[in-house]
Image: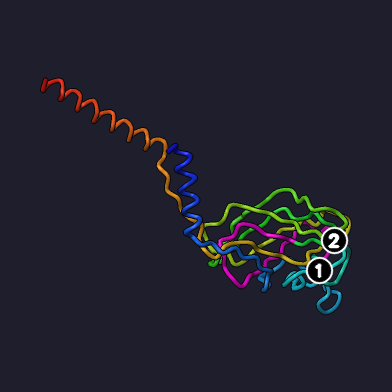
Amino acid sequence: MKLHSLIAAALLAAATSAGAVPLQQYASTLKGFSSEYVPSAASWNAIQVLDAPNTLQYGDHVTAWAPATENSGFEWISVGFDTAVYASGATIRETYNNGFVYQVDAIDTLGNLHTVWNGVDTSAANVPFNFTVAWSTTSYLVNGLKVYVDTRHSNSWEEIDAIRLLGDTVAPPVVQVPEPASLGLLGAGFALIGWTRRRQARRAA
């Protein structure tokens, strides 16, 4: 069997035996935030990002989180989730002036931050949009996310309705495959054994 076939078989067996359980969950707790717009109780507050989406129309709605001021520079919001997972992605539901997320950090169970995504937010404009980012499954358990927002993106507020975490409750499999260098040494060893046996056979003759 060729090496790539052995690798594929090992990966499949490991994934099957691991029994990974995919889990998608919305944020349940608020860990922190840079600012919030609070003209009245609960309107545009940071707590608006918790639970499932409830801003059904695009626009400036009180059911989404907005930073305190327009064009205030870089803002952030940090949320927690009920179940710690080995994380592989997140969805940020943007509902006003989409396209403003520039970084996502995973928060492990010890409170450490790990940048898992940064780049360009490609959310569609003028509609509520689920901006989804993905990364290689973490080797550590994640129970929180920190989302970074660039409020210079537009001349008005940027708003987030919900944040969802994707992951598995079972650790990703660790597959050990012989490295090419190790295979080369093994082949050289067999060749040396064969040469030694042939030499001994000639002497015996």
Residue 126 sits above or below residue 48 on the image:
above
Which residue is depicted at the point 81% across and 67% down?
A: 68
The residue that disc 2 covers is 96
Judging depth in this view, the residue of 157 and 68 nearest the camera is 157
Residues packed near mark 2 inside 10 Å, few (<14), some (14 to 19) or many (20 plus): many
What amino acid type is highlighted by mark number 2? Tyr
Tell me the element at label 1.
loop
Choose between 160 and 132: the one closer to the eye. Answer: 132
**Figure check: 35 above or below 182:** below
Q: Nearer the viewer, residue 145 or 55?
A: 55
Relative placement, left or right, of 7 versus 80 is: left
Identified at 70% across, 48% down, the residue is 119
Label pair 1/2, CB-CB below 8 angstroms: yes
What residue did someone put label 1 on?
A: 64
- The quarter of the image holding the C terminus is top left
Within the magenta stretch, is there residue 193? Answer: no
Left or right: 45 in relation to 176: right
Amino acid type at circle 1 is: Ala
Q: Position of residue 124 (x, y in %)?
A: 82, 53
Q: Which residues are magenta?
A: 69-92
The reply to whether the magenta stretch includes residue 86 is yes
Q: Secondary structure at mark 2?
A: strand
On the image, the x and y values in percent for residue 164 come to 69, 64
Q: Position of residue 96 (x, y in %)?
A: 85, 61
